[in-house]
Amino acid sequence: GGGRLGADAGPGVDGGDDGAPPTGAPAPAKGGKGRAFTGIAAAAVTTVLAVVVAGQVADGADGDGGTRSQSAAGQARDAHDPASRDDERPTPSAPEAAAPLTYEQKLGKRYPLSPELKASGKFDAIPGIAKAPGKGQKYTYRVDVEQGLGLDGDLFAEAVQKTLNDERSWAHDGARTFERIHSGQPDFVITLASPGTTADWCAKSGLDTTEDNVSCDSAATERVMINAYRWAQGAEPYGDAMLAYRQMLINHEVGHRLGYNHVTCDKDGELAPVMQQQTKFVDHDGIDCRPNAWAFPKG
């Protein structure tokens, strides 16, 4: 919001130092003739001014759209505010347009989505191509987003590409590189889907995601399933660290597609391996671990 408007100016009263109200008729001036002549002259000036002002008002009321003479009161009037403004009073400026959120800010927010949602079961492939940036073993993937989620599919696709090709991810040390395609046969399809649809696809590979509302790599199919409830709302072990949680979710499920199985941390204070089930827990068996989104957190 802008600054506060100044307080409304009080009535413009010209008074003496003591602020006393007028007490009646003015004191008589010295010399009768001078007083009479002054009165006649003042009356004449007043008459002329009245005629001029009347003419200006008449000219201004003709509605011809031309330039109008304005009275002092009209000049002090705001077109959008019928109340007259004091010249000293600041005019509020229009609020600045909010700057668009950055990638990190968008991925740092939670988004509404029911843990019990079962959407259409129909998918839209995110259009466009994101070229593999590296020279390692190339994997191609498509991003499908279930219809009816109300989530930003382009943001999801951007997150997948940036995350997988990060030096801390499976692209570490030039070993792999990942390319998003939208047609042809990819190596796998990263799919953002409602909890109900995620459960259906994970069940095709003998996996039950319903107990903790989790994601899965449906290895018997082409789909790596990302549970849209978790994508939108996160998980307790990560608290408000939504960006890191989403990076972990991508790295963990694609890690399964690359052949990695679940592991856990071994010592207090260690980073949890990215292949630990961090949606469910970070600490385990009396060992206090720290959340970690990356396969190679040191880069």
Image (tube, rainbow, N blue to C red):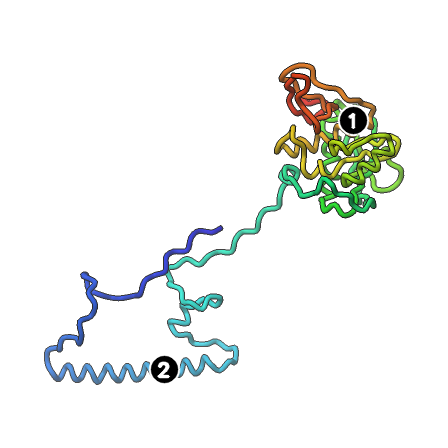
Q: Label 2 to label 1, Cα distance in Å?
A: 88 Å
Find residue 271 and report its image quarter. top right
Tell me if I can see residue 95 in this picture. Answer: yes
Query: Badges 2 and 1: C-beta atoms under 8 Å apart?
Result: no
Amino acid type at mark 1: Gly
Q: Name the residue under label 2.
A: 52
Q: Which residue is most to the front?
A: 211
Q: Is mark 2 on a helix, strand or loop?
A: helix
Image disc number at residue 255: 1
Residue drawn at (13%, 77%), measured in percent from left and top? 29
From this view, report whether residue 139 is shown above or below residue 12.
above
Task: Compare residues 137 and 83 and report the one nearer the observer.
Answer: 83
| Lower sequence index among marks 2 and 1 | 2
Q: Is mark 1 on a helix, strand or loop?
A: helix
User: In this figure, what is the number of numbered marks?
Assistant: 2
Residue 101, image x and y in percent? 62, 43
Amino acid type at mark 2: Val
Residue drawn at (70%, 42%), measured in percent from left and top? 114
Residue count near mark 1 (Cα–Cα under 10 Å), binned few <14, some 14–19, many ≥20 = many
Residue 298, image x and y in percent? 67, 21
Residue 128, image x and y in percent? 79, 43
Find residue 143 and report its image quarter. top right
